[in-house]
Amino acid sequence: MSDQGTPEQVAAWVDAPVEDAPAPSGARYMVLNMGPQHPSTHGVLRLRLELDGETIRNCQPDIGYLHTGIEKEFEVKTYQQAVTLTDRVDYLAPLSMNLGYCLAVEKLLGLEIPPQAQWMRVMLTELTRLNSHLVWLGTHALDIGAMSVFLYCFREREDILRLFEMFSGQRMMTSYFRIGGLALEPPRGWDQRVKKFIDVFPERVDEYENLLTRNPIWLGRTRGIGVISLEDMLDLGVTGPMLRAAGLKTDARKDEPYSSYEKFDFEVPTRTENDVFARYQVRIEEMRQSTRIVRQAMEGMPPGPWKAADQHVVLPDREKMKTQMEALIYHFKIVTEGFRVPAGEVYQVIESPRGELGFFVVGDGTTKPYRVHMRTPSFGNLQATARMVEGTLIADVIAAIGSMDFVLGDTDR
Amino acid sequence: MLPESLRQHAVAQAVEAFDAEAIVGGAYDRGELALEIAPPKIASVCGFLKYDQKFVRLSTVTAVDRYPAEPRFEVVYELHSLERNQRVRLQCRLRGQDPVIESVTSVWRGANWYEREVFDLFGIRFMNHPDLRRIMMPDDWEGHPLRKDYPITGSRV
């Protein structure tokens, strides 16, 4: 005690005004710049936080660091070439992006897709949902301090990526869905590989739950955190698991079925607590439901062609191309100049792992899209950040924004 | 003036009953209803659709550049009603010279970023927008990249 001064001196220090403390008049607040290079923003998001002690008074998200002008790029690619651009937008759910774009263009073309291709698309987009949710769970837990969950999640993610590689030759930027069906014939033995994976996956989900669901640290960091009212969310454009964690049963797979989702039996999980923990529970349950869909698709895979029969749009088989003159001509036309898509405008919505993914495609009768706009779920969700974190503690910002599950590529496009 | 072919659509009828001069055209194509709205009426029509017709969600706002045609710009609003499980598209045509339209942030706060994006990439101004700044491009950027007369490649001289 003696080397710290007398009790009188200590009392004087405590009472003395501190330079940065908020005074009742002419208040000064600390401004904290979080990001753009911050490990828990998963990309380049910058938050400008104005702090009153540890409480956030004001939050201004700053985005655009990953803007690459993909929507402009669409306008100089042919419709089929542009499929590869969609992967790069939401790089954690590339097949969902492929599907949304292909469905939009197919709607513009009025193209009928054979059942096998549709079911294969459903199966692979559900595996994509698992992939995306696994990355979310692993990194979100890592942010909040549960290191080991990350390793478990990435173990299963690796299995899914190997499956994607088996189908398309690519682990992440698959571009496996093409306008008119699939890019390649499904590989031999795919069903055994998928079966092997989904046989063990439900147990693995139990494993994650064992690590987290009743973990007191996890509960302490997620329960009652990141609450935002349902009205605010609808007003600000939030979609997907966030709405479902607030008790709103909305899912484009059920409400506006596409790619024969109406033929699958699955539940849309909801919770009412509307906090970070509820969002975690919703996504965990979605993983189980997606596994159900994958199993149904695998077991009931209809036989038949995996691409549409329209020779103006879909490349002919190699065999035909080398033996039939007409097939060769179509092949040449499609490869060199692409196919013409009639004029019109469509807005196709699908349920991506993050929420409502909309493709607004304008055709003008040429071989290149006149305009493509992507309504990406991350952009809408991120807009609610400020509303969600203002008035809460700075330590909860990471948990709150992590629960939104955004991808900055998806936000900035 | 509501086109005859759209009379069977309840939403189109309701908007016409609300303000007959607001609708200047429209189409029903590939299962999607699109209404063309007179630009000065957009905020009031959106308010009507949200509070009276249960279109609680604004899915997106975007634009199309029809350069060199006039009116050059088309602002597109995608509305979604959860209760009716229905979507409707509103479109407004704007001239190329100093395009400006009323903001719908008074109806949906979520229109904020979408309109900033359209402002940034197309140079369309939104009146009464609370915070009309660039969102994707740097603040000192010149030009609006999604305009059709903006080159896809090349360096600035």
Image (tube, coloured by chain):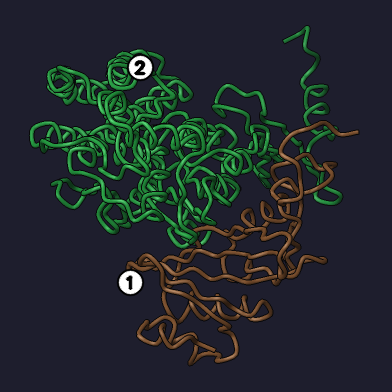
Chain colours: A green, B brown
Residue at image mark 1: B84
User: In this rendering, is residue A411 above or below B73?
Assistant: above
In the image, A336 versus A71, the foreground residue is: A336
Residue at image mark 2: A169
Residue A47 picture location, percent across and down: 66, 37
Q: Residue at x 86, y 49 (%)?
A: A26
Q: Residue at x 40, y 19 (%)?
A: A146
Q: Residues within 10 Å of mark 1 (few under 14, many from 20)?
A: few
Residue A262 picture location, percent across and down: 18, 52
Q: Is residue A16 visible?
A: no
Taking the view exactly as shown, the residue that stands out farthest to the left is A299
Question: Quick one: SS at disc 2?
Answer: loop
In the image, A219 versus B105, the foreground residue is: B105
Chain letter for mark 2, please: A
Residue B57 picture location, percent across and down: 46, 64
Q: CA distance from mark 2 to mark 1?
A: 42 Å
Q: Residue at x 49, y 85 (%)?
A: B15
**Is A303 displayed left or right of A240 in the figure?**
left
Q: Nearer the viewer, mark 2 or mark 1?
A: 2
Say what amino acid the circle numbered 2 marks.
Gly
Q: Residue at x 48, y 71 (%)?
A: B34
